[in-house]
């Protein structure tokens, strides 16, 4: 019997893109193999959203790297609420506020603060938060800056970092958070940076470094970008839209290249 | 004015028209987040009953968002066509539902009625309709538009080929364009969401897609979905531009958050038409919308998200667009929580837009943090196909590697065309047959070899 699947010779174009091209077809439908590959990727992305972060394990790793760790929670009570009430995820619960107010009275204000929130991908935070914090800690020390305790916020959204920073009187906040998982990138970590953090700021006051994962931006590249932003921010005493990352010119070689495009032969 | 009724032992009261509209809306997370949803299921039905008794004319006298402070309200009321409205002017919202479902409301009658309807009237009637009502009435509507081909004809279903790439790499984009064309996709538009709004990146892609369409003589149009001001700048600098894209919303404040207003959209339309690039027609605007956009911009004025969305269609129709689509599941679970809410919203959006005379498509989609999966998308796709949707998206394997969400694939479009006996736009269908991509019966015939004009391509180029 002949193969019921019609394969596509142009699948070799996948060297140019991660898009799912040249999948072939069974009739006009997706072949079984490609169908199940998709299901697996969707399952990974779903689990990244719904599996709880192992905070004990993360705390242990952070301790081993010499960080003091505070454990905090947003106002969200469970994952379903987290997904439907972003406003609750942006604020600390009462116990966490009391705890930070108490701690703030006991210690001096930190030069900056690393905050970790699970966000939408526990997979990303479990894989990348500790190694990222380690590199950031070293880079900050190199500049003579003393980061405060690492604050771990469960069920947190981006803005929760600003409340943590405000309560601890931190000069700035570096928030590490699991990004909305893509089908082909379930483990992407994001960094949001705020100078002079306080409750009520919007994204316009923050700088974002996105797509930190092995196939995306490396830990070292992300650290360099963040340190550039932070030092500029301390010099100019601001963050957000007025602070652009001019450290690395975007690689536009693909756009400017005179390379011949296979679809437009003879054209440069 | 307050609205009240008694059901059994319980008295229900709604303080004004927008509260009544919001509480009559089938449950969705965005209205809960905004604090405007019904408290319970019975209150929702009480509101629907009161809404059904409301004369349609009420919406011409009582603005949900003040005329003085919102240019979308002014557009809606200032352009209302009283003569077109006359056949239904005496009806209540409930009577209007019955009339729409009756045989009196045929295709031509509905086309003539469209300028007489306001978004609020259409949103109101949708709130008391079931899924089958939304499908059946929409299926009677017909909105046909033209640029280089003819979209929206009966028995046709078109696709936007969406070859996005996370770094806008031309080779990566070309690979997805070729894959899409070989699967019969791209008659609505070949449209890229660029990763940045950088002028040079955007215009490089415009030039490339124009080159592809001209070289292969494809009866379709392209679009780079950057901010409207970037596209106007490109036109003024002589860069080829087919369709002009912009995201729009149903309130002036939400549009302000997008950096646009009605005057700017008018300027864009004029700039686009000055190029005279359409061969069959002059529809060249491409708009995207989606429930929840006004709320997410904190610009909803206490109006429910579905009514805000429908108001965006009044903005769209003012500029004679070629394409409008609701990106229904993209916004996330805080606005549409699960497959059930996404499916209902997609059908409402299509129904409301078609009734208003808007050439409606749908980005049938979901994100990975929504309670939805491919099965939900298959249901919405099948239902919108039956309802006569003008176009859907087409993307390799449903996976948008730039925007990180899932939408319909090239395969999905072939599925819905096959089970419903639908075809692409006629000019594009003829091109697919000339290229050997479709056979004479309109079936996909590409196998392992590159057909027609593509046979000579050297895919091994580095």
Image (cartoon, rainbow, N blue to C red):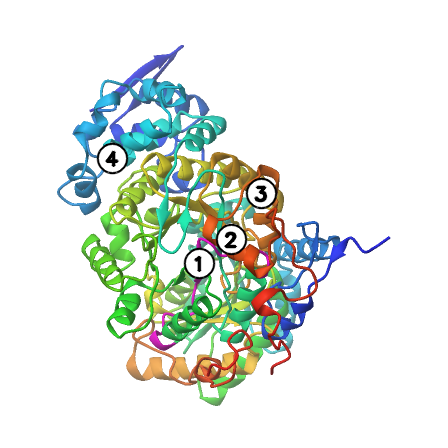
- Label ID, residue B416: 3
Q: Residue at x 66, y 53 (%)?
A: A43
Q: Is residue B454 magenta?
A: no
Q: Residue at x 21, y 52 (%)?
A: B262
Q: Position of residue B82 (x, y in %)?
A: 17, 29
Give the magenta-colored segment's residue range. B182-200
Out of B174 and A46, give the one closest to the viewer: B174
- Label ID, residue B34: none
* Residue at far left of view: B68
Dot 4 or dot 2, earlier in sequence: 4
Is the Cβ of the residue at disc 3 closer than 8 Å to that at disc 1? Answer: no
Distance from disc 4 to disc 2, alpha carbons, whole Å, reads 34 Å
Do tags 4 and 2 sit on the same chain?
yes
Do tags 1 and 2 sit on the same chain?
yes
Disc 2 is placed on an element classified as: helix
Q: Which residue is mark 4?
A: B115
Q: Which residue is mark 2?
A: B430
Task: Sort mark 2 into few (<14), some (14-19) or many (20+) by Cα contacts within 10 Å.
Answer: some
Position above or below: B393 against A21: above
Residue A182 at least partly seen = no
Is the Cβ of the residue at disc 4 closer than 8 Å to that at disc 1? Answer: no
Q: Residue at x 40, y 10 (%)?
A: B8
Disc 1 is placed on an element classified as: loop
Dot 3 or dot 1, earlier in sequence: 1
Instruction: Report which quarter residue B229 is drawn in.
Output: bottom left
Position above or below: B298 against B422: below
Do tags 3 and 4 sit on the same chain?
yes
Magenta segment's dominant SS is loop
* Residue at far right of view: A1
Q: Which residue is mark 1?
A: B219
């Amino acid at each position: 019997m002949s193969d019921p699947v019609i394969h596509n010779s142009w699948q070799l174009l996948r060297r140019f893109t991660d898009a799912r091209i040249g999948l072939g077809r069974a009739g006009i439908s997706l072949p079984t193999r490609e169908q199940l590959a998709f299901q697996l990727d969707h399952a990974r992305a779903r689990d990244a959203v719904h599996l709880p972060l192992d905070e004990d394990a993360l705390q242990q790793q952070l301790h081993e790297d010499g960080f003091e760790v505070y454990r905090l929670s947003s106002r969200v009570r469970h994952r379903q609420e987290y997904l439907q009430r972003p406003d609750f995820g942006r604020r600390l619960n009462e116990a966490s506020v009391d705890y930070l107010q108490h701690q703030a009275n006991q210690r001096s204000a930190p030069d900056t603060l690393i905050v970790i929130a699970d966000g939408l991908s526990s997979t990303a935070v479990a894989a990348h938060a500790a190694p990222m914090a380690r590199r950031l800690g070293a880079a900050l020390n190199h500049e003579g800056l003393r980061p405060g305790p690492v604050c771990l916020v469960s069920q947190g959204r981006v803005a929760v970092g600003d409340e943590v920073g405000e309560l601890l009187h931190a000069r700035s906040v570096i928030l590490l958070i699991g990004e909305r998982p893509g089908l082909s990138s379930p483990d992407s970590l994001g960094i949001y940076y705020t100078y002079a953090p306080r409750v009520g700021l919007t994204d316009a006051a923050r700088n974002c470094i996105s797509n930190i994962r092995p196939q995306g931006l490396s830990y070292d590249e992300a650290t360099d970008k963040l340190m550039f932003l932070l030092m500029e921010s301390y010099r100019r005493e601001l963050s957000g839209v007025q602070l652009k990352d001019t450290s690395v010119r975007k690689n536009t070689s693909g756009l400017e290249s005179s390379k011949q495009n296979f679809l437009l032969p003879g054209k440069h | 004015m307050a609205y009240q009724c008694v059901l059994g032992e319980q008295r229900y009261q709604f303080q004004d028209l927008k509260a009544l509209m919001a509480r009559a809306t089938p449950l969705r997370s965005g209205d809960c987040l905004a604090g405007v949803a019904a408290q319970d299921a019975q209150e929702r039905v009480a509101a629907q009953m009161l809404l059904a008794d409301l004369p349609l004319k009420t919406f011409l006298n009582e603005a949900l968002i003040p005329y003085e402070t919102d240019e979308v309200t002014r557009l809606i009321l200032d352009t209302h066509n009283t003569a077109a409205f006359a056949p239904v002017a005496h009806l209540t919202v409930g009577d209007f539902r019955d009339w729409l479902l009756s045989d009196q409301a045929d295709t031509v009658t509905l086309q003539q009625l469209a300028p007489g309807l306001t978004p609020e009237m259409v949103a109101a009637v949708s709130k008391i309709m079931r899924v089958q009502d939304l499908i059946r009435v929409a299926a009677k509507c017909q909105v046909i538009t033209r640029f280089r081909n003819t979209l929206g004809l009966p028995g046709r279903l078109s696709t936007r080929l969406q070859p996005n790439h996370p770094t806008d790499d031309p080779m990566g984009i070309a690979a997805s364009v070729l894959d899409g064309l070989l699967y019969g996709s791209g008659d609505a538009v070949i449209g890229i969401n660029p990763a940045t709004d950088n002028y040079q990146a955007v215009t490089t892609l415009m030039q490339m897609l124009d080159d592809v369409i001209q070289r292969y003589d494809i009866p379709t149009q392209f679009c780079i979905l950057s901010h409207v001001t970037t596209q106007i700048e490109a036109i003024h600098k002589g860069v080829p531009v087919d369709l002009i894209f912009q995201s729009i919303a149903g309130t002036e404040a939400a549009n302000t958050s997008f950096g646009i207003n009605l005057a700017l959209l008018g300027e864009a339309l004029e700039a686009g038409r000055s190029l005279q690039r359409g061969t069959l027609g002059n529809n060249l605007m491409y708009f995207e919308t989606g429930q929840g956009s006004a709320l997410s911009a904190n610009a909803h004025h206490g109006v429910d998200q579905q009514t805000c969305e429908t108001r965006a269609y009044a903005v769209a129709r003012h500029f004679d667009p070629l394409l409008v689509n609701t990106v229904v599941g993209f916004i996330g679970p805080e606005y549409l929580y699960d497959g059930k809410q996404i499916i209902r919203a997609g059908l409402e959006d299509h129904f409301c837009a078609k009734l208003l005379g808007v050439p409606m498509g749908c980005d049938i989609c979901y994100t990975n943090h929504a309670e939805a999966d491919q099965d939900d998308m298959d249901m919405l796709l099948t239902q919108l196909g039956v309802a006569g949707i003008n176009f859907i998206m087409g993307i390799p394997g449903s996976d948008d590697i730039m925007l990180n969400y899932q939408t319909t694939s090239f395969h999905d479009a072939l599925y819905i065309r096959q089970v419903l006996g639908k075809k692409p736009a006629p000019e594009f269908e003829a091109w697919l047959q000339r290229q050997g991509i479709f056979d004479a019966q309109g079936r996909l015939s590409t196998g392992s070899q590159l057909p027609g004009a593509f046979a000579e391509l050297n895919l091994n180029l580095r």
